[in-house]
Image (cartoon, rainbow, N blue to C red):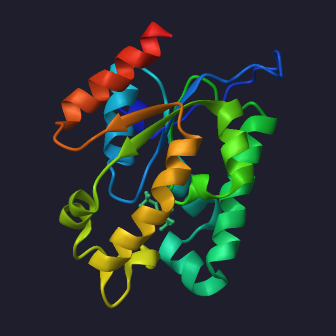
Amino acid sequence: MKNFAGSWEPGNDRGNRNSKLKNVILIGFMGSGKSSVGYRLSYALKRSLCDTDSLIEKREGRKISQIFAEEGEQYFRDLETATLKQMLEKREYKRCILSLGGGTPLREENRKLLKQLGTVFYLRVTPEMVWERLKGDTTRPLLQTEDPQRTIRELLEKRDPIYMEAADIVVECSGKEQDEIVEFIRKKTVEK
Ligand code: S3P
């Protein structure tokens, strides 16, 4: 149990290829709490946690900021798509908690893959919440701008409709404790 949330256990299901893999998928802007909610959910639901950013870093042997700097954003986006495809094609991940990078749902192709991988929960936050959590952060290449607060506002405004389109269930996080968010997703998952 101790290492449960930090690891993932690839399955070997070769069953019906058309059925959803019943993963719980967390999407949302940088700083929306996907990783920490995912971590807590993995305990609450007794499911393995997979963080796609960590998976990419592990496979590439370098940090995301390094991948952006050395290869550019498109290369990273291709890695995100390849990761989702692999999860689906090999049916490696089922009944897991998948925490995605904030930009993963932006590609239409990725949104289609997500629909097949499981139920998509959008952790919806305000720009103020993101700023509060991420001011001073140096690990997100897209926020290393002259005015990160403005970048957050602009990016979030552009992305919100896309996240909404990708989501099966929208989780309004403003004014909620993380406990409530975890419990909301847990309930929705066990009710299904
Ligand atoms: C990104 C979000 C990051 C990471 C990369 C790009 C984005 O993940 O994938 O820096 O485009 O929103 P988090 O959402 O976990 O910060």
Q: Residue at x 28, y 55 (%)?
A: 126
Q: Is residue 89 visible?
A: yes
Instruction: Note whether 32 is above or below 2 in the view shown.
Output: below
Vertical placement of 56 versus 121: above or below? Answer: below
> In the displayed structure, does residue 30 sit left or right of residue 62?
left
Q: Residue at x 30, y 86 (%)?
A: 147
47 horizontally vs 138: left or right: right
State the image coordinates of residue 101 (x, y, percent, origin top left): 51, 56
Q: Quadrant of residue 57?
A: bottom right
Q: Residue furthest bottom?
A: 146
> Where residue 107 sits: x, y (%)?
68, 57
The quadrant holding residue 88 is top right
Q: Which residue is depicted at the point 39% across and 60% down?
A: 30
Q: Is residue 102 visible?
A: no
Residue closest to the eye, 170 or 36: 170
**How far across and how far down the image is residue 174, in percent?**
22, 44
Q: Quadrant of residue 136?
A: bottom left
On-image quarter of the N terminus = top left
**Looking at the image, residue 173 lies above or below residue 181:** below
Q: Nearer the viewer, residue 45 or 110?
A: 110
Q: Position of residue 184 (x, y in %)?
A: 31, 23
